[in-house]
Image (tube, rainbow, N blue to C red):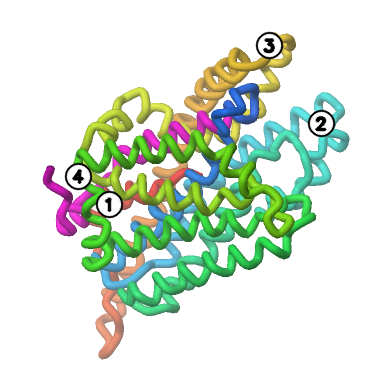
């Protein structure tokens, strides 16, 4: 079967299968938290989110750089802020106000943890109704630092960026030894997952790296890779049990790098057309995938409502009910908050571009002065959709 070419890959404006993959990741996490079967090991869905984020964010930056010759930090941070902050703050407000109303603001941990939630150091907060947001603390620090590192390493110097990602992954592996006994042991390995996605994006953007990975991008390989990934996922528990206690580190921590690499291999196969891509691109999968960020954040609210009306519900029925109600609430957030705020962010960026282009024109050109970027074209607008990654 014919494999994807590098030119075909660079011409892609969307990766539709990845919305479906986000859907699976979000549902896995909800099932893990609320009665899903233990063999499913849904906690690994967060690692899938991390790899996806590293891949999508880096791909967006590399393609912006290829198109315009630079990476705009201001636009990057504005896109991330309008994408992440509104829903995050709305759900945090609901959790905090509800806790205060029922008199549990301090006892359930949300009050003492607010300082962590408001500074995106969530991974160090204690147990609370907003505890699932710990992954946002990991991702926000990545969003803050990685663009600065990418720019500091120089324009289109892919080898340096790949080296930085590999170095970061190595440091994450080493640093995990110093977190044994911590309340959140092994937290550096979450950056290993994100940087695995970064390294994949850099590799696929490079003609040499793409040539190495190209055999994974045909239809037959996609089926084989998907089956292999399913095998790895279902083997997470026995692999963790085998690794448990190595150097005093819990097995579920040590399995993270294995799962991250397996996810990166799967992503490589899913950028190309194929039967698995078609399944993940179906309307139901796209529906859930587009709401996966809100679903991830609102899951505790949904679970609380389910418990209030049906306290005896447990097991698979509970996880299915929480997922269904969570999706309903996520749909409201998606339409009322996510879409309007993403649109507002795009308008803010567009106005700034117009302003940046107008001021030099009024002042007149100066010798040696850099030219302002052109207003966003339809093509670059479509490309920007690639970067709407969801944590």
CA–CA distance in space, label 4 to label 1 = 23 Å
Labels 4 and 1: the sequence-earlier one: 4
Identify the residue under disc 1: 383
CA–CA distance in space, label 1 to label 2 = 43 Å
Sort mark 1 into few (<14), some (14-19) or many (20+) by Cα contacts within 10 Å: some
Identify the residue under disc 3: 313
Circle 3 or circle 1, nearest the eye: 3
Q: Residue furthest front?
A: 242
Point 68% across, 36% down: residue: 93
Point 61% across, 27% down: residue: 38
Q: Residue furthest left?
A: 2
Query: Does 278 appear above or below 306?
Result: below
In percent of width and height, residue 376 lies at 26, 57
Magenta span contains residue 8: yes
Labels 3 and 1: the sequence-earlier one: 3
Labels 3 and 4: the sequence-earlier one: 4
Residue numbers of the magenta segment: 1-30
**283 vs 34, nearest the viewer:** 34
Q: What secondary structure do most residues of the magenta stretch adopt?
A: helix
Identify the residue under disc 2: 100
CA–CA distance in space, label 3 to label 4 = 44 Å
Residue 259 in view of the camera = yes
Residue 118 in view of the camera = no
Identify the residue under disc 4: 218
Local secondary structure at mark 3 = loop
Local secondary structure at mark 4 = loop
CA–CA distance in space, label 3 to label 1 = 44 Å
């Amino acid at each position: 079967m014919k494999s994807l070419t590098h030119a075909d890959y660079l011409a892609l404006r969307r990766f539709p299968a990845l919305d479906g993959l986000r859907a699976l990741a979000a549902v896995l996490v909800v099932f893990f938290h609320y009665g899903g079967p233990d063999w499913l090991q849904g906690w690994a869905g967060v690692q899938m989110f991390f790899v996806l984020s590293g891949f999508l964010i880096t791909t967006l930056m590399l393609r912006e750089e290829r198109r315009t010759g630079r990476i705009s930090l201001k636009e990057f941070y504005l896109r991330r802020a309008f994408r992440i902050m509104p829903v995050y703050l709305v759900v945090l407000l609901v959790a905090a106000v509800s806790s205060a109303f029922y008199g549990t603001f301090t006892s359930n941990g949300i009050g003492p943890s607010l300082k962590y939630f408001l500074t995106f150091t969530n991974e160090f907060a204690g147990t609370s109704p907003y505890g699932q947001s710990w992954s946002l603390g990991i991702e926000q620090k990545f969003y803050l630092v990685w663009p600065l590192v990418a720019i500091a390493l120089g324009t289109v110097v892919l080898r340096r960026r790949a080296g930085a990602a590999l170095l970061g992954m190595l440091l994450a592996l080493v640093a995990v030894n110093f977190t044994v006994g911590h309340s959140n042991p092994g937290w550096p390995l979450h950056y290993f997952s994100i940087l695995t996605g970064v390294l994949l994006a850099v590799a696929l953007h490079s003609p040499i790296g793409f040539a190495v990975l190209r055999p994974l991008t045909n239809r037959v390989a996609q089926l084989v890779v998907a089956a292999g990934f399913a095998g790895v996922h279902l083997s997470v528990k026995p692999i963790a049990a085998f690794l448990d206690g190595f150097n005093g580190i819990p097995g579920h921590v040590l399995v993270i790098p294995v799962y991250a690499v397996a996810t990166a291999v799967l992503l490589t196969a899913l950028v190309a057309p194929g039967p698995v891509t078609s399944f993940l691109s179906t309307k139901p999968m796209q529906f859930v995938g587009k709401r996966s960020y809100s679903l991830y954040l609102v899951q505790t609210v949904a679970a609380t409502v389910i418990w209030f009306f049906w306290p005896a519900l447990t097991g698979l029925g509970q996880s299915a009910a929480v997922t269904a109600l969570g999706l309903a609430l996520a749909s409201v957030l998606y339409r009322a908050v996510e879409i309007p705020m993403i649109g507002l962010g795009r308008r803010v960026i567009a106005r700034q571009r117009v302003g940046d282009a107008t001021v030099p024109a009024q002042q007149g050109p100066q010798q040696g002065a850099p030219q302002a970027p052109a207003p966003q074209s339809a093509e670059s607008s479509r490309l920007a959709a690639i970067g709407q990654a969801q944590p």
